[in-house]
Amino acid sequence: MALKHRKKYHSITHTGKENRQFQIAGPLSTDTIEQAEFDEGLKAFRQPEQQKKALIDVSKLEESRIIAAIENNKIVGYAVYLYPDEMERWSQYRFDNLIELGAIEVSMDYRGHNLAKEILKVSMMDDAVEDYIIITTEYYWHWDLRGTGLSIWDYRDIMEKVMKSGGLMWYATDDPEITSHPANCLMARVGSRVSTESVHEFDRVRFQNRYMI
C-alpha cells in the first residue's frame, strides 16, 4: 500500500538575538512561498530568485516538506525534505517512506539566531514523521567554510549538533562519496512507526560491500 504523505502545519515563535521575533513554520504551502519575500542572502545553492522558484517547484511534490524561518513575511532560512535524487544510492531504497533533508540554509545576515536548530525542531513536530526514515548526507565540500571561517571539524561539530536537535543521529555506511573523507557522514532519524522490514532495507542500501557488513 502506498504511503499517504500526511502533513500537519506547525508554527512557533522564536526569539533570536536582540529580541528579534521569527516565525518557524511548515510544511509551507506553495501559495505561502509564492507570497513571501525571499531574503537576498539565501544564495548558497543558486541566486535567491532562482532558489525561491526551486522551492515553489519542490513544494508541489506530494512527498515534499518545506519548513522555514520567517521574519515580517520574509523567508530567511529553510529546510527541504523530499525523495532522494535518482542519481544517489539512497534512491535504491525499495519503499516510499524514506525522505532526505535535501537542503538547509540560513541567510548569512541571519546567522547567530539559532534558526537552523529551530527549523529542525519544527520539522519533527508533525506526528507523520514517525512514518519515515529521514536521512541527510553531509559532504564537507558543500559546507560554507569560507563564509563562516570555521575549520572542517569545527563545522562538522556544529552541523552534527544542529541535526541532533531534529533527532538525526550518525549512521555508518560504505557509500563511496561519504567514505571519501572522514568529515563526511550519513545521519538519519528512524520514525517510531517504521517497520522492521523498512529498517532492514535501509541497512541493505547503507552497506553494499559485503565485507563491511
Image: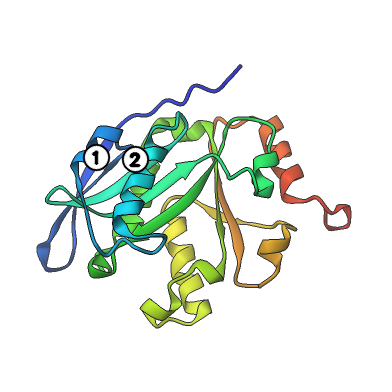
Q: Look at the image and tell me whether residue 193 can be seen.
A: yes
Q: Which residue is found at the position 57% from the left and 65% from the top?
A: 139
Count the marks: 2
CA–CA distance between discs 1 and 2? Answer: 7 Å
Vertical position of residue 165 compared to residue 7: above or below: below
Between residue 192 and residue 52, name the one nearer to us: 52
**Residue type at tag 2:** Ile
| Crowding near the residue tagged with mark 2, few <14, some 14–19, many ≥20 C-alpha atoms within 10 Å | some
Q: Residue furthest top?
A: 1
Please tell me in which quadrant of the rendered image residue 186 appears. bottom right
- Label 1 neighbourhood size at 10 Å, few (<14), some (14-19), many (20+)? few
State the residue at coordinates (65%, 30%): 95
Q: Which residue is mark 1?
A: 34
Colour option used: rainbow
User: Measured from the top left, where is residue 86 in percent x and y?
Assistant: 63, 43
Q: Determine the image quadrant of residue 57.
A: top left
Horizontally, residue 49 falls left or right of residue 82, namely left
Residue 109: percent from left, percent from top: 23, 69
Q: Which residue is mark 2?
A: 56
State which quadrant residue 21 falls in: bottom left
Tell me whether circle 1 and circle 2 mark residues in contact (CB < 8 Å).
yes
Image quarter in which the N terminus is found: top right
Sequence-earlier tag: 1 or 2: 1
Query: As drawn, is 7 to the left or to the right of 137?
Result: left
Q: Position of residue 55 (x, y in %)?
A: 36, 44
**Taking 131 as reference, is 149 above or below it?**
below
- What's the residue at 46%, 65% (across, down)? 159
Residue at 36 percent across and 49 percent down: it is 121
